[in-house]
Amino acid sequence: MKILVPIKRVVDYTVKVRVKPDGSGVDLNNVKMSMNPFDEIGVEEAIRLKERGIASEVVVVSLGSGACQETIRTALAMGADRGVLVETDLELQPLGIARLLKALVLKEQPQLVILGKQAIDDDSNQTGQMLAGLLNWPQGTFASKLEIADGRATVTREVDGGLETLELPLPAVITTDLRLNEPRYTTLPNIMKAKRRPLDVLQVADLPAEAVPSIKTLKVQPPQPRKPGIRVSSVEELVRKLREEAKVI
Amino acid sequence: MLTLPEKLLFIIFAILSIYLTYIGFSQIIVAVRKGQPEYYSRSNRLFERIREAFVRTIGQTPVLKSRPLVGVFHSFIFYGFTFYLLVNLIDLIEGLLPPSFAPLSGSPISSWFRLGSDVLGFLVLVGVIFFVWRRFVSRDTKLERFNDSVLLQAEVRAGGIRMDSLIVAGFIFFHVGFRLFEAGSLLAAEGRLDPWQPVATLIARVVGFGPDRIIGWHIGWWLSLGLILLFLPYFVRSKHIHIFVAPIRLGLGRRAATGEKIGSGALDPLNFEDENVEQFGVAKLEQLRWSQVLDAYACIQCNRCTNVCPAHETGKALAPSAIEINKRYELNSIRATLAKGAESPRPVMEFALSESALWACTTCGACVGICPVGCEPLIDIVDLRRDAVMTKAQFPQDLNSAFRNLERAGNPWGLAQDNRKDWAKEIAAPTVEENPDFDVLYWVGCAGAYDPSAQKIARAFTEILHHAKVRFAILGNSEKCTGDLARRAGNEYLYQNLGAENVQILNAALGNRDKRVVATCPHCFNALANDYPQLGGKYRVMHHTQLISELVSDNRLPELILDENITYHDPCYLGRHNGIYDAPRQVLNGPKRIIEMQRSRENSFCCGAGGAQFWKEEEPGNTRVTENRFQEAQATGAQVIAAGCPFCKSMLSSSESAGETGAPLVLDVAELVAENLRRVKSKLGIG
Ligand code: SF4
Ligand code: SF4
C-alpha cells in the first residue's frame, strides 16, 4: 500500500509573526520556516504504518517554491521514501492545492492520503476535505487514532461530545489531529541518507489541473495587542470589577 | 642460597608465570590500542606529565585527600610494596646466586635496608589487616553499596569484587608475611639477634634458635617469591593491576596542543564533516577513546565516585564506578578474542549501565573530580548519550521538545527569538549596536532572557552594572542558546550548530578588541570558556560574581551590609568544572560570614538541573536531587540560600521543602548585591 503525505512549508511556530507594513501579507524575510506541525504528524503516522508492515511506500509531496525541497528533505530524514515537489510561484489556496493534489493522486495511485488537519499559517482547515470531495473518497478528519486492516481504515476523532469512531473503506483521505502521535526526532545517519533519497521536481504545468487563486486578499492586519491584566485583592473586588468595568456579569 | 633442584624448579616456574602474565598484559594493550584517537593530547608535555604522575603517586595525595584514614593505611601498603620490589630483587639474587654476589652484604646501607624491609613489611601487614577488617568485618558500606537498580555484571553481583579483594589481600599478606618469616628463620638458624630487624627477631624468638631452622628460610623464600609467580597471571585481571595503570593514568590528563590543562568542563567534540559516518558517539566498546578503555583497568573499584554521585545518592540506577567495573569485567572476559581481531559481542548499554542510569546523570563532574586515579566516567556517559540521541534517536521523550525548540527558536523554551530582550523592558540594557564602546559584553543566556525567576537575576545584575558605571552591552535578539544542554544531553550536532552561530555573532560583536564577556549563568560561562574554543571562539569569560567581587574591591560597589544568615550553594559548572569558589564568597561575606554547608566547594552537591535534567522528568529514585540539597542548605539554619546559577535557583526554590513556611529563600548572588545596594542607599538617605 502506498501512502501520499502532502506537507506544507510554514512560518515556524516559535516565530513571532510580523505583518508587512503595507498590509499585503506576512513578512517572510529572514524568518525561520519549517514543516507544518500537523503535517509532521501525518508523515510520522505514515512512517509508522510502513514500519508495521502495513504500508509499502511513503511519498511526501509539497507545493510551492524551490525552498520546499528543504521541508521535503526533513520528511525524508524522518523516513519517507520519496519526495515530489510541485514548483510554483502562484499564491496557493486550499481549493487550488486540492486540485493539484487530486492530479497527483491520480498519477501516484496511493491507497491513503494523510494530511495535517490544518496549516498553522492560514489555519484554513479545508484542503483535506476538498481533496476527498474532488476524489469522491471517504474522509476521516481530525484523527487522533488510526488503524488499518483488511482494506479499511478505522479512525477515532475527537469531537465536542467525546470520541467518534469511523470506519472507512480504502482508498481514503485522513487528516491528523495533535494527539495522533508525537513525531520522531531524526537521527543523523537518516539526515545524511535523506540527501540521497529521490526527490522529483514537477511544474504546475505538468499536472492536468488549474490552481488559479479564487480568493483575493484585501488586507492583513496584526491582532490588537492584549491589554495587560490586573491583580485584584479579593473575590468581592473581582466580582465588582466584572460587573461594573467588564460588564460581563 | 637455594639447592640446585630448587633453583631449576624456580626458573621453570618463573618462565611459565611470566609468559602467562605477558599474554594477559598484551591483550590489555591491544584492547586499549583499539580505542579511538583522542581529541585533546594526552601525551604532550611528557616531562610535566611524568612529574605530575610521580608526585601524586609518591605523595599519595589523591588517596589521602578524599578518605584520610584509608589513605594512611593505603600509604603503608604503597610504600611497603614499593620497597619490597627492591627486597624481592635482592632475595632473588641471594636465592639464586652464590653469596659472593649478595649485593648488600657488608655494605653500610645493609642495616638500613634490613630495617626498612622489616618495619615496612610490618606496616604492610597492618595495612592489609585494616583493609580486610574494613571490607569483611566492619563492612564499610561505602565500598560495595550499590542501589538495587544499578546494572552490574553477573560476576560482580555474585561478589566478584569481594573475592578479588580477598585474593589480593591474601596475596599481599602471605607474600610479606612469609618474607618476614624468612628473615626471622635466617636469624634463628644463624642464632643471632638483629636490632635492625625487630619484627624478624621477634619471629626468631618464637620459632626458637638452631641451625635446622634454615628450613624456615627455604619455606619463607619459596612462599614469598613463589607466591609472586603464582599471583602474576591473576594480577592482570585483578584490581591490583592499578599499581601499574593508576600512576600512568594520573599522567594522562587532557591538555590542549599548547600544553594547557583541559578541565572537566570541556567535552571532546565530534567531527561531522565526513558524510559517510553512520555511527555517532559510542555504542560498542571499541568505539570508546583509548583513555576510556584504559580507565577500566585504572579504576581501583573504590566507589568514591559513586559515593558522591547525586544520582546514586538519591536512589537512581546510576553508579559511575559500576560503569568502569562493568567495562573491566567485560574486557576481562572478551580480551582474548578481541586480541585475535574479533569485534566486541554486545553493545555497551547491555552491560555497563541501564537506560535510566544513562539519563540520570546531571554531568555534575563529582565523579571525575574525586577519582584518585583520574578516571572520567562522565565522558563515557556523554558518549553513550551521543549514540542514543544522534544515531538512534532513543532518549527521554521530554527532551524531544527541548531539542526542537532549540533548533527552531534558539532557546529551549521555544519562545520567540524576537522576545529575547523583553526582560529588559523596564531597565536600560543597550545592545552592542546601541553602545559600541562597551567594555564588558553581558551574555544574558536563555534563562535570563525568558525565565521569570532568572529575569530577576538579569535585571539585578544590570542594576549593579549601572550603579558601578560599567560600560556594558548585550547581544539582544541575536544571542542564542549556547547549546550546553544539547551538548550534555548528547546532541553534539545541535550544539555545534548553535555554537557556530554564536561564535560568529560574538566574534563580530567583539572584533579584535580584547573585551570581557560576563555571564550570569555558569552553564553559559562554561560553554563560552571551555566549549567554544573548539569552535574558534576564544574569549575572556568571567562569571558575574567575579565581576562583582572585582567592583567591590575597586570601591565601585559598597561593601555588604546585609545581616541575614546566608549559605552559599556552589553550582557544579562554576565550582567543580571551573574552579570558581572564592569570588562569590568574597562578595557574600559581610557583617556575617556565610554559613558553609557540609558539602561545599569541590564537594558541593548538585542541585539536579545539569546535563539537561532541567528539561526532563527526574529518573526514578527515592528522592529528588534538589530536595536532598535543599534540606542540607536548610539544616544550616540560614535564612537565605545564595546561588550563582539561574538553574540552581529555579531547582532549589521549587523543591518540596522550599514550599514550607519559614523555609529559606533562594536568591542569586546578584539579587542579594542589588538588595544590598538598595539598603545602603536608603541608609544613606539617597535613592
Ligand atoms: S557526573 Fe555527577 S551525576 Fe554524572 S555520574 Fe558523575 S557524579 Fe554522577
Ligand atoms: S572510577 Fe575512580 S573513583 Fe570511581 S571506583 Fe574507579 S577508581 Fe574509584
Image (cartoon, coloured by chain):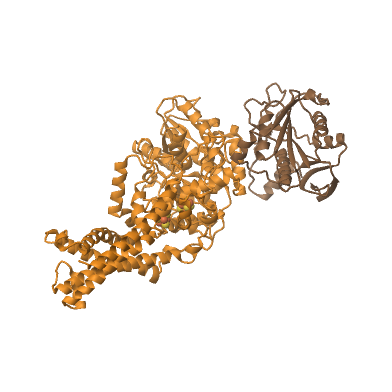
Chain colours: A brown, B orange
In which quadrant of the rendered view does residue B635 lie? Answer: bottom left
State left or right for residue B683 relative to residue A245. left
Nearest the eye: A228 or B491? B491
**In front here: B651 or B243?**
B243
Q: Is residue A218 above or below residue B577?
A: above
Residue B571 is situated, as x and y percent measured from the top left of the image, at 45, 47
The answer to whether residue B160 of the structure is visible from this angle is yes
Q: Quadrant of the N terminus of chain A?
A: top right
Residue shown at 46% from the left, 24% from the top: B436
**Measured from the top left, where is residue B600 in percent x and y?**
40, 52
Q: In this view, does B214 lie above or below A177?
A: below
| Quarter that holds the C terminus of chain A | top right
Q: In this view, does A61 lie to the left or right of B281?
A: right
Q: Is residue B52 left or right of residue A127?
A: left
Residue B98 image offset from top left, x and y in percent? 17, 62
Placement of B252 over or under B528, stated as above or below:
below
Q: Position of residue B386 (x, y in %)?
A: 54, 44
Please state the quadrant of the image where ligand 2 appears.
Answer: bottom left
Query: In this view of the protein, can residue B199 be seen by the observer?
Result: no
User: Observer-nearest residue: B608 or B497?
Assistant: B497
Vertical order, B198 against B471 (above or below): below
